[in-house]
Amino acid sequence: MDVEQFWSLMEQARDRAAEATDASKATDAADATDAEGIAQQAAALLAAHEPQQILAAQQILWDLMAASYQAPLWAAAYLVNGGCSDDGFDYFRGWLITQGRTVFERVVADADQLAELPVVRAAAAELLELECEETLGIAWNAYRTATGTELPGDSFTINYPALDPAWNFDFEDHGRIAAQLPRIAALYPD
């Protein structure tokens, strides 16, 4: 499995989540933008692959987590979710991965692009948090389904980059965040 295949799998999962939602609207199914549904579909799709491909997908997932480990994105997540711990930032980035490659890459390049996403605008209007811890377990769940065993603990490495020291300020300082991320800050006024 390579990065292209991983993102293709995530798009298939998004499509399947949308189909499941359409097929069961009468049963109050989750919306297709529901990250947990997408993560569950991704795990099911990945489970059909060979164990080595599942292990490769685990590394790709954590490479994406490292690529998105950026202070501006953390500040944006802090605004969106009304606070953001270390784990909360992981779950926010898990949500971001479920939004697909185009959204992920655009937001990683410019965290203020979050303000342009309809799902973020809707979440801001209703003060809903955007996070998906389940994304972090896609490969774990797939491997367990495929093999009946746990994913080896040494199946991936992660090297987070240093955070930009220019962002080393209290994210409670709405004015400083608004100066750096004006569009997302406008959705979450102080």
Image (cartoon, helix red, strand yellow):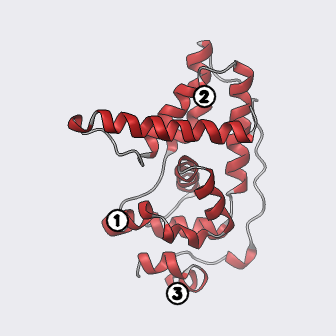
Q: Nearer the N terminus, badge 3 or badge 2? A: 2
Disc 3 from disc 2: Cα separation: 40 Å
Q: If the image is split into quadrants, where does the C terminus sit? A: bottom left
Tags 3 and 1 in contact by the CB under 8 Å rule? no
Which residue is labeled 2 in the image?
Answer: 140
Position above or below: 97 against 27: below
Kind of residue indicated by mark 1:
Leu
The answer to which of 95 and 164 lies nearer the viewer is 95
Task: Give the mark toward the camera: 3 or 1.
Answer: 1
Q: What SS does tag 3 mark?
A: helix
The answer to which of 103 and 144 lies nearer the viewer is 103
Q: Is residue 153 shown to the viewer in this render?
A: no
- Residue sitting at x 53%, y 64%: 77
Position above or below: 149 against 94: above
Q: Kindly indicate the quadrant of the structure image that contains residue 71.
A: bottom right
Left or right position of 109 against 179: right
Residue 105 percent location from the top left of the image:
66, 58
Tags 2 and 1 in contact by the CB under 8 Å rule? no
Position above or below: 72 against 133: below
Residue 155 percent location from the top left of the image:
75, 30
Which residue is labeled 3 in the image?
Answer: 175
Q: Kindly indicate the quadrant of the structure image that contains residue 140.
A: top right
Disc 3 from disc 1: Cα separation: 20 Å
Residue 2 percent location from the top left of the image:
76, 36
Which residue is labeled 1 in the image?
Answer: 127
Kind of residue indicated by mark 2:
Trp
